[in-house]
Image: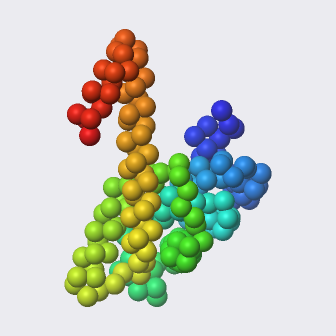
C-alpha cells in the first residue's frame, strides 16, 4: 500500500503535487499519470509527469483520453478558450510524443478507458474516409498495439480469476481446462 492509495495525487497546490510526483517511484508516477484528475492547474504537474521517460504508451494514452481531447479536436488553435489553452497544449505535447515513439509499449499497463481509445480510433478512420483531419491524429499502429495488449491483459486477468474460482469451488485443473475453451 502506498501513500497515494490508488495513487491519485491529493488535492493541493500545483507545487505540492509536483513535489510529491518528483519523489515518487517510476511505477507510482505511471499510476499517478493514469488516474490524474485534469483541472485548470494540471499543466505544470501533468506536464512534468508526461515528460518522464518512465511513462509508457498505455499510461500516456490513458492520460490523453482522460484529458477529453474530443472537446478541442476540430477547434482551430486560435478558438480554444483561454481557460483551456494549457490543457490543449498538454494534449499537443502528448500526441507529439506518442507519434514520435517517446512512450514505449510495455507489457502490463493497460489503457484506463479502452472504449474511449476505440471510439477515437473509429473517429480517425471516419475522418480519413471523409477527407478531414482533427487536431490530434494518433499513430493507429501504436494505438492498435496498445489496445491489443490491454485486451490480452484483460483476458489473462479473467482466466486467472476463473482459475482461482475453480480451485475455490473444488474443481480439478482438468475440469478447468475443459471450461476455459468454452469461454473464449
Residue drawn at point x = 36 percent, y = 81 percent: 134
| Nearer to me, 45 or 39 | 45
The answer to whether residue 22 is above or below residue 175 is below
Q: Please identify the residue farthest to the front as the structure is shown.
A: 174
Residue drawn at point x = 61 percent, y = 44 percent: 7
| Nearer to me, 142 or 12 | 142
Figure quadrant of the N terminus: top right
Figure quadrant of the C terminus: top left
Q: Quadrant of residue 46?
A: bottom right
Residue drawn at point x = 41 percent, y = 29 percent: 161
Q: Position of residue 6 (x, y in %)?
A: 57, 40
Q: Position of residue 70 (x, y in %)?
A: 37, 70
Q: Is residue 28 left or right of residue 112?
A: right
The answer to whether residue 163 is above or below residue 93 is above
How many numbered discs, if any? Answer: 0
Q: Position of residue 18 (x, y in %)?
A: 72, 58
Residue 150 seen: yes
Q: Quadrant of residue 147?
A: bottom left
Amino acid at each position: 500500500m502506498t501513500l497515494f492509495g490508488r495513487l491519485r495525487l491529493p488535492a493541493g497546490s500545483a507545487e505540492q503535487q509536483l513535489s510529491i510526483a518528483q519523489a515518487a517511484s517510476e511505477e507510482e508516477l505511471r499510476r499517478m499519470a493514469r488516474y490524474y484528475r485534469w483541472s485548470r492547474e494540471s499543466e505544470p504537474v501533468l506536464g512534468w509527469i508526461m515528460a518522464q521517460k518512465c511513462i509508457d504508451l498505455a499510461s500516456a494514452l490513458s492520460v490523453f483520453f482522460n484529458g477529453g481531447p474530443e472537446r478541442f479536436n476540430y477547434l482551430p488553435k486560435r478558438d480554444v478558450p483561454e481557460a483551456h489553452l494549457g490543457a490543449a497544449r498538454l494534449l499537443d505535447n502528448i500526441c507529439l510524443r506518442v507519434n514520435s515513439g517517446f512512450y514505449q509499449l510495455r507489457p502490463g499497463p493497460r489503457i484506463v478507458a479502452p472504449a474511449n481509445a476505440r471510439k477515437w480510433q473509429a473517429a480517425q478512420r471516419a475522418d480519413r474516409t471523409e477527407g478531414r483531419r482533427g487536431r490530434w491524429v494518433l499513430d493507429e499502429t501504436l494505438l492498435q498495439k496498445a489496445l491489443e495488449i490491454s485486451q490480452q491483459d484483460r483476458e489473462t486477468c479473467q482466466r486467472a480469476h476463473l482459475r482461482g474460482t475453480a480451485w475455490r469451488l473444488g474443481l480439478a485443473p482438468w475440469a478447468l481446462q475443459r471450461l476455459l475453451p468454452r469461454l473464449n
